[in-house]
Amino acid sequence: MLVPSSNTTMETEVPEVLRRVTAQTGDRFTFHSSRMRMKTVSAEELAAMNADADRAAVELADAAVDVMAYACLVAIMSQGRGAHRGIEERLTQTAANAGAPVDIVSSAGALVTGLHHLGARKVSIVTPYMKPLTALVADYIEAEGIEVQDAISLEVDDNLAVGRLDPTNLPDIVRKLDTRGTDAVVLSACVQMPSLEAIPAAETVTGLPVVTASTATSWQLLSALGAYTPVANSGALFRV
């Protein structure tokens, strides 16, 4: 997994989903990450991190991994509509050139692919971002054919502070979303905002399927490995 240097969530939530799968199937996984410098969620730092992704992919290629995930949703979505396709293709070539022809997925691509997999045509989302970045995320999702009815921005720009947000507050936050006529809720449109433990309560509050950036990434990683299985309390993409 390629993660921002200040990320403190994906290396917790994704392994937890893998642990749940292991408990269900007995399949075992190893998990490895390489970090790219980013402390503040700004356009400049996100662009610099994207430029550094090739170096991180080469490092992971040395571990002979079977699949890689670029785990920063907004870094890709802030680059313009459909950017995940170009970045996934670029990193696939980078890994192949380093002697590791592997599947490359991204949190940005996984989220929109996961929502399409669920048949979601209209969603409401929660993000930790400042409102201009949330608007870019909403535009990106809509460009993929999924309407964003409502969005809540928590307006936290320090990435470490995002990772320290209390996930138990999310069910109350999601109550404020306009979810009328929506097909699903994106509880955390950010890989850094902790959300996994809040999914069951958020689904109870909304009565809707719930997806997060981290569960979508986990789902696509496991699908690429041929190791997907439904597991409890992990959201709509892992429905038992």
Image (tube, rainbow, N blue to C red):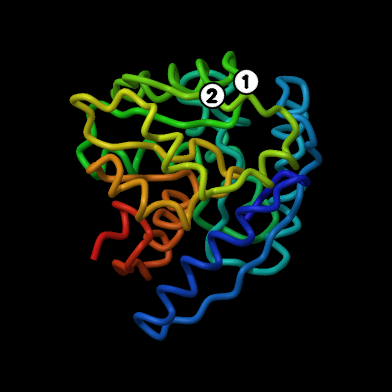
| Quarter of image, res 45 | top right
Q: Secondary structure at mark 1?
A: loop
Relative to 151, 159 lies left or right: right
| Quarter of image, res 72 | top right
Q: Position of residue 130 (x, y in %)?
A: 62, 20
Q: Quadrant of the N terminus?
A: bottom right
The residue wearing badge 2 is 153
Residue at 44% from the left image edge and 21% from the top image edge: 138
| Quarter of image, res 11 | bottom right
Q: Position of residue 58 (x, y in %)?
A: 73, 53
Q: Earlier in the sequence, mark 2 or mark 1?
A: 1
Relative to 68, 213 lies left or right: left
Q: Amino acid at mark 1?
A: Met
Q: Amino acid at mark 2?
A: Ser
Relative to 196, 158 lies left or right: right
Q: Secondary structure at mark 2?
A: strand
Q: Position of residue 197 (x, y in %)?
A: 47, 58
> Quick one: label 1, few (<14), some, or many (20+) residues within 10 Å?
some
Asked if residue 222 is positioned above or below residue 166 in the image, the reply reads below
The one of 184 and 136 positioned closer to us in this rendering: 184
The answer to whether one can see residue 70 in this image is no
Residue at 59% from the left image edge and 74% from the top image edge: 30
The image's mark for residue 130 is: 1
The one of 60 and 9 positioned closer to us in this rendering: 9
